[in-house]
Image (cartoon, helix red, strand yellow):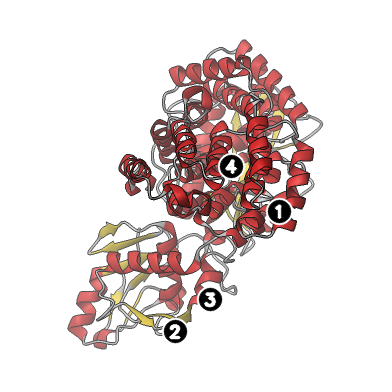
Amino acid sequence: MIPMATVWPLGIFFVSPQAAEYTIIAAQTMSTAKRSAAEFELDLGRYELRRSGSRVKLEKKPMELLMFLVSRREQMVTREEIIRKIWRTDLFIDAERNLNNIVRKIRTALGDDPDRPRFLETVVGVGYRFIGPMRVVEAQFPRAETLDIPIDETSRSIAVLPLVMAGKANDDEGVGIGFADALAAQLGKLQGVVVLPSSATIHFSAAVSPKEVAAKLATRFVVHGAIRLQKGEWRLSVEMLDAHSGRVCFSKSFDTSLDRFAQVEGEVAREVARALKLPLNAPQQRPRHSRNPLAYAEFMRGYKLSGSGDPAEVARASQHLGTAVARDPNFALAHATLSFVFAVQHFESDPTSALLEKAEFHGSRALELDPELPEALVARAFLVWGPSKNFQHLEAITDLKRALSLQKNLPHAYNRLGTILAHVGLLDHALEMFERGRPFHPKRAVSPSVVQVYGWKGEFERAAEVIAAWREESPNNKYALHWAPFPAMMTGDWDAASQCMEESLAAAPHDPLMISMQGLLHARMGKAEAAMDCVMKACSYPQSFGHAHHSYYQIACIHALVGRPETAFAWLERTVNTGFACWPFFLKDPCLENLRAMPEFGLLVSSLQAKYPDHLGLL
């Protein structure tokens, strides 16, 4: 039940003693205060703003900023404080534009006038001050009375650990990991709370305490437990720890069997939702995992290896997953995971058709078995947004949005959606998707693929920072090596660009993506003959680790820079027709300067603007 506020004379009202720090005192007349207090209500537990009892739609970042400003009512909060609080860094955001946009959304939700503010006052050049009346309803889950817990995503985040096997048993069957995966998937439907996917927790050993896990993953709540096989039945004990207060939010035990695990997972999910006073909508319609114990065990072995990033381990993962679907042909999640693994292998290491055909078969089978399985929708999006399907942007966007509406904690979906939106020119929305995927990463890091957004927006310094961090973490990653020369090349630092280019070519000397990048560097430096030699060489190699449209774009730029605008435009059209349609970059890239006066260039840009409107990027 939502606690009712008590309204006192002189416009003073309180929610509860525990919520006193958030209570708003209306500095207006009593009648105005009563009217305003009844008008807007900020519910911290439900993570929503209400007006006269009706929910007001407000996105995540605007909601976070509103909560922060309300908690500092009547105080001036600087823009720098806001950036540190809401983003914790300005490395991955365009601070000014993003903050202005968020403030505008808050004012729209409150019906506030910036010229005559009733709620949110601008302190020009410095920051903002919340001045209006607002009833605040405190969150209902336990919190430490002696700690000032900040209102950020850390205080609404959950990690689900694999169950620990008690006694002498080991987890060869993957029971503990499977339970964590299914529970995290169900909790991924909760609104107003970040639930880390099981991929973030499956590698923690039983020796690491829940409190240590919370600290390492920057989460507040940890669901953990143990399981024991006793006389043919599983004895399961689960609890949820509030790491901020040290309290146990709930503790429960079950006696069950493997074929009844789905019911237990659902019951624990409901316990978590009750503890957080959050509704758990759309209950699981069917078991997530196979009831065949051998298929279940093989799937768990493959699932654990599938996200390693090591080609040898990923190959082993596909073998385990293949065995799982052979033992249970109706195991939808195994088909979807196998499809995704084959699609990634095809794209990153084996461009032949054999893996692609396998990926398509298992993806289709997964959707036949469960049309609403989020992982199956993500797998299909990876396939339709690829060279074999000629980059079907709209279809892939639809699948990814649908998957995220069913389950929020799908980092691959956010990252792929960000990449696709960047390719069609919706760069601000692309950046938002990468940011929305950040909380589900174990280190709360943005995918390095965000470099595309910064590069194509012309923010070369930020692009260079992302590339440097990427290369430090993955020195041999070919995508990082491909991007490495780009910022220096675009800013005229020929020595730095040439050094990076040498390293890139050493990693992939026969790849058209690297060779055409070298040609572009030559063209930028005025070496037309060397640039055209690279074009000829790039066109002689049929296969690339990357998407061909980026090679085509670099070739278009080379032709433009050496004074061949008609040929350049033909390559630019080929670029667009094969999947790269980032028209804002076309308009600002200095390499294409002598194409912009061509009527056909204007028509191309106009057609792309119409085909990929701004609302396409809304989630």
- Where, by quadrant of the figure, is residue 411 drawn? top right
> Mark 1 or 2, which is nearer the eye?
1
Q: Quadrant of residue 24?
A: bottom left
Q: Who comes first in sequence, dot 1 or dot 2? A: 2
Q: Which residue is mark 3?
A: 80
Amino acid type shown at disc 3: Glu
**Circle 1 or circle 3, nearest the eye:** 1
Q: Are marks 4 and 3 in contact (CB under 8 Å)?
A: no
Q: Are marks 3 and 2 in contact (CB under 8 Å)?
A: no
**Left or right side of 503 for 80:** left
- Which quadrant of the figure has residue 125? bottom left
Which marked residue is nearer to the observer: mark 3 or mark 2? 3
| Residue 235 drawn at (x, y percent) | 66, 33
Q: Which residue type does callout 1 highlight?
A: Ala
Judging by the rendered image, the residue that carries numbered circle 4 is 197
Task: Quadrant for the N terminus, please.
Answer: bottom left
